[in-house]
Amino acid sequence: MKGLKLPFGPGALVAAAFIGPGTVTACTVAGASFGFALIWALVFATLSAIILQEMSGRLGVVTGQGLGSVLVQTIDTPYLRYLTIGLVLSALYVGNAAYEAGNITGAALGVEAALKDSGLSFRLYIAAIAIIAMALLLRGTYRLIETFLIGLVLIMCAAFLVAVIIVKPDIGLLLAGLKPSIPDGSLLLVLALIGTTVVPYNLFLHAAAAGERWKGEGAIKSARTDTIVSVGLGGLISILILSTAASSLFASGLAVNNAADMAVQLEPAFGAAARWLIAIGLLAAGLSSAITAPLATAYAVTECFQIEGGTTSRPFRLVALSILLTGASIGLLGLKPVSIILFAQLANGLLLPIIAVFLLIAMNRRAILGDNVNSLTANILGCGVVVIAFLIGARLIWLVATKLFGA
């Protein structure tokens, strides 16, 4: 990207990570089920993510280390340190391996929606997505991966922006959706919209990527701008997806389960272009998450075990490859790893508030950050986000409990 002055950097990895098939599905269902009523939740989630990710990026820039490294060095009690590391690695490694199947399958659904009459095997799409992601993870440098993901984020933005222009949303209803309200039956969906935007593994991904991209206090301003622009763009993409579903499906009373369904539903009313746009957006969302999930896991694992070398080291690439291959295998075999995903949800439900609290504590330690510790305003905002993280975590744990015990 030399000579190209775009305000994007590691923050684009965060946007690429949280705009995955899960987020696209949640936004699609929210728009189809409740119209524009839940747009406020996405705005709220985006601002919350910016607050935490700014802290994570600042930590990486100032210390030159990732969140995992700081975690290991600052927990003095061995028992607590090992317990925390065990929880982090369980949630990220096992969880992302299971979620990777959804990322790859989601990208394949985008291809299938675009090429619905091709007659090609769905497994072929899965294999092709996995090969693309594998090639980038094994051969790409950090800057190449970052540039590729920035491109995917911009593709998503363009695809969903044109799609929403085609369906012509009611601007008055859209603006009315900025007023917080929780329609009957929408509470869990509100928490899902927030929970797919504010995620624990992005804190590890962002700190490590920022530390690798920038060094020293002088880069804090660049890192902050990148976070605001990139995560803000990710939030805009979510809003565009919800708006498309609200404008085209909610008014018609059409039910969908994911964005691939929306792509098919839009074609009769808005033409093949609408189907192609949604399909391309879903493909970009799935492929970007299929790359960032292994990246985030590899960063966390190598940091916790204090393995140096960055994205080009053999241990880093082996961890990333193991996540990718596990997800691809699950997708190719058509397996539904329900028990693994339930464990991952439970672990992430515990991990999110713990990591958010740890990050807030670390951001107030002058021994780590010097004069770049949090301001009073940042701490107040951070505490608010910690409360949100606790609610999201409690929701995930409760959902898992109801599935396991039939409550």
Image (cartoon, rainbow, N blue to C red):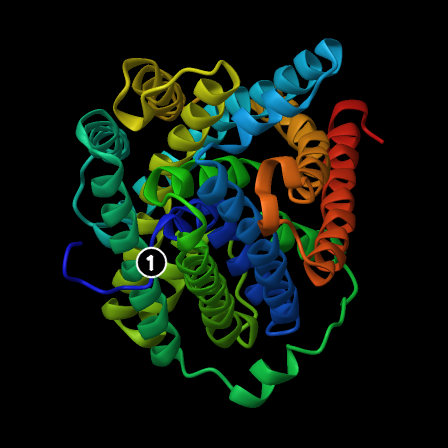
Residue identified by numbered label 1? 8
Residue 199: tell me if it is visible: no
Q: Residue at 33% x, 63% y: name it.
A: 7
Q: Bin the neighbour count of mark 1 within 10 Å (Cα to Cα): few under 14, some 14-19, many 20 and up.
A: many
Residue at the spot 48% in from the left edge and 31% down from the top edge = 99
Position of residue 247 measured from the top left corner of the image (x, y, whole percent) = 49, 76
| Residue furthest bottom in the image | 172
> Does residue 258 appear in the picture of this structure?
yes
Please tell me which residue is depicted at 25% across the width and 61% down the height of the picture. 276
37 up-or-down from 155: above or below? below
For the image shown, how many numbered marks are present on the structure?
1
For badge 1, the amino acid type reads: Phe
Residue 286's place in the image compared with 241, above or below, is above
Q: Is residue 89 left or right of residue 326?
A: right
x, y percent for residue 165: 36, 80
Q: Residue furthest right?
A: 407
| Quarter of the image that includes the N terminus | bottom left
Relative to the observer, which residue lies in front, 264 or 341? 341
Query: Measured from the top left, where is residue 33 in percent x and y?
Result: 62, 64
Q: Is residue 389 left or right of residue 92?
A: right
Quadrant where the image shows the C terminus: top right
Above or below for 47 versus 85: below
Q: Quadrant of residue 403?
A: top right
Q: Position of residue 107 (x, y in %)?
A: 33, 43
